[in-house]
Image (cartoon, rainbow, N blue to C red):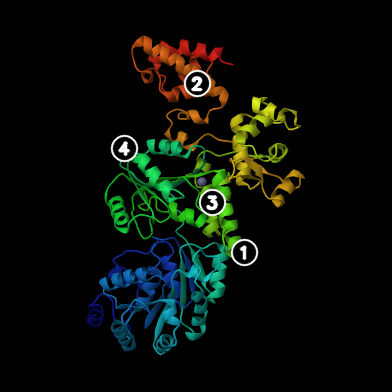
Amino acid sequence: MSDASARFACAAPPADHPFEDPRRALREVFGHEDFRGLQEQAVATLLAGRDALIVAPTGFGKSACYQVPALCRAGTAIVVSPLIALMADQVAQLREAGVAADMLNSSLPDEARRSVLQRLRSGRTRLLYVAPERLLMGGTLELLRSLEISLIAIDEAHCVSQWGHDFRPEYRRLSLLAEAFPGVPRIALTATADAQTRSDILEQLRLAEAEVLIGGFDRPNVRWSFAEKREPLRQLDRFLATRPRDSSGIVYVGSRKKADQTAERLAGMGYAAESYHAGLEPELRAARQARFLREEGRIVVATVAFGMGIDKPDVRWVVHLDLPRSLEAWYQEVGRAGRDGLPSETLTLFGPNDVSFARRMIEQSDAPEAVKRVERLKLERLVGVAEGTGCRRLAVLEYFGERAGAPAEPCGNCDACLEPQEEIDGTETARMALSAVYRTGQVFGAAHLVEVLRGTASEKVTRNGHDRLPVFGVGAGRSEAEWRSILRQLTSHGLLEVDLEGHGGLRLGPAERVRPVLRGEQAVSLRRPKADPIARGARAKPRAAAATAEMSGRDQALFEALKAKRRALAETAGVPPYVVFHDRTLVEMAQLRPGSRAAFAELPGVGRSKLDKYAEAFLEVIAAAD
Ligand code: ZN
């Protein structure tokens, strides 16, 4: 044992005396008792001399997958990384742990580089982090080929793929590592890769025999919800009203201006909210990020720029007021919630304007057609998850490939599981809507179209002669709210488009999408319109917190009448109106229209005393309504 204890006198043994037991390396060098998730399998694969591809999200502990085997195999490990900051950070941490680690990149002064090379030649270096350009230089490659190499790790491996969001041409040349270092196990690592990117990585890096390990994408403690965007700021207000004041959260928006405005608005409401985006001075940005990390109960309203490289474990919620551009981007952003494993919640709002806007940005960009095709697909995957009626988690895990082989059990902790939505055959309905749009000239907004479909002969409808169209009144069987939701869904499906330059009118989508539906060759499935999920989260009784803005015209009229009654009662009693009933109760009253004392008692905010005092007066108003 004396031999062994001498060997482990420093934390990590020199390159020619590796650890024999990976668990011991993990414990003694990194201080962890056990491997997490697929780390152990990855380590075993490399120690067996085989290749691997690891797909796992940021914060999962991917680096242990190659650092531990690097300490257990003889020789120097080469770690290819494109990010200098990340490299420096890893090298510093390894050195802190007593491991002989070095890096080679363009940021290094000549003298420092010389001593790195010297240490390399002496065989003492356990891990060498190197930028791809530097590695591929003749001199570096020659030197490394003359040394004993334990393994090769290729970080951020999605950079090799045009399908990835971060394509780097020099990564393609890393394929030559297979020939330059025969018999040396190689491991590719990435945080985000769909099936296409994965197969691209395997092909480009010549990892045909690699063990593909995917994991860590599921965060069962985080509840994912999606909702149609109706009035985003009010939807946000209601979401926040259900959060404890001391919980930290992030609001993502699509533009800097919107970040500033939203943060200001929240601050005005008493929240500790600040904006964060690339347009701010670096010092200000750093200060805001630091405050968010340090203090409890802070809110950051950010563009995508926020969160790179931060790892705050107790972010309790993430709200998207605008839809991100891809499922990966969405995942990365909601992935900032609940890293500590405690219950957390996310809400993603998506609206027809978002989807139309994102689609148009893709079409109008200068990117090559191949890139546009990829971006289009990535956007449609996200829209598909948002629009779908199935479990969100199953859809997302399937996308990231984590579900392979696992039984398809719904998660029970997403909005689709908690409040299942019915899918209906909307083919006929879609055709009604599309022909209403077409027949009215493709310039009118949802309100007008709904009137035409429902057969409401308003002044505008008759003035335009739309009451004489064959589509007038064909959809009388559906409510105004239902038709609005249907028009939104058809826009998400790409069958309708919002005219963003004009007055926001709806027009038909591309002919190749619309024609098969009009001809009856393609079915359209729709969600049955649902209540606002935020309202559900906040409820004490069912459907408690609907907003006045979401009421139909008929309900709105009754709501006004109820408010007048409340005002009168409050005046008589000498109390403020809200003491009689909150708005929330009146909204429910207007929508549910209780016809009896018993039904009235079911409303939120109606206790026994108020039932006795007010039921009769309000029931009268309801009975008198149309
Ligand atoms: Zn679910």
Residue kind at label 4, given as amino acid type: Gly
- Seen in the picture, residue 227 relative to 100 is either above or below; the reply is above
The amino acid type of the residue labelled 2 equals Phe
Q: CA distance from mark 3 to mark 2?
A: 41 Å
**Residue on which the image places disc 4:** 270
Q: Which residue is mark 2?
A: 559
**Relative to 301, is 199 on the left or the right?**
right
Is residue 221 visible to us here?
Answer: no
Where is residue 445, by image quadrant? top right
Q: Position of residue 247 (x, y in %)?
A: 33, 43
Q: Count neighbours of disc 1 (C-alpha within 10 A) and say few if under 14, some if 14 to 19, many if 20 or more.
A: few
**Which residue is depicted at the point 51% across and 50% down?**
393
Task: Say which label, 3 or 2, has the lower sequence index.
Answer: 3
Per the image, label 1 sits on a secondary structure element best described as helix
Give percent across and percent down for residue 617.
46, 10
In the picture of the structure, the residue carrying the numbered disc 1 is 369
Which is more N-terminal, label 3 or label 1? 1
Image depth: mark 1 or mark 3 in front: 1
Circle nearer the N terminus (4, 3): 4
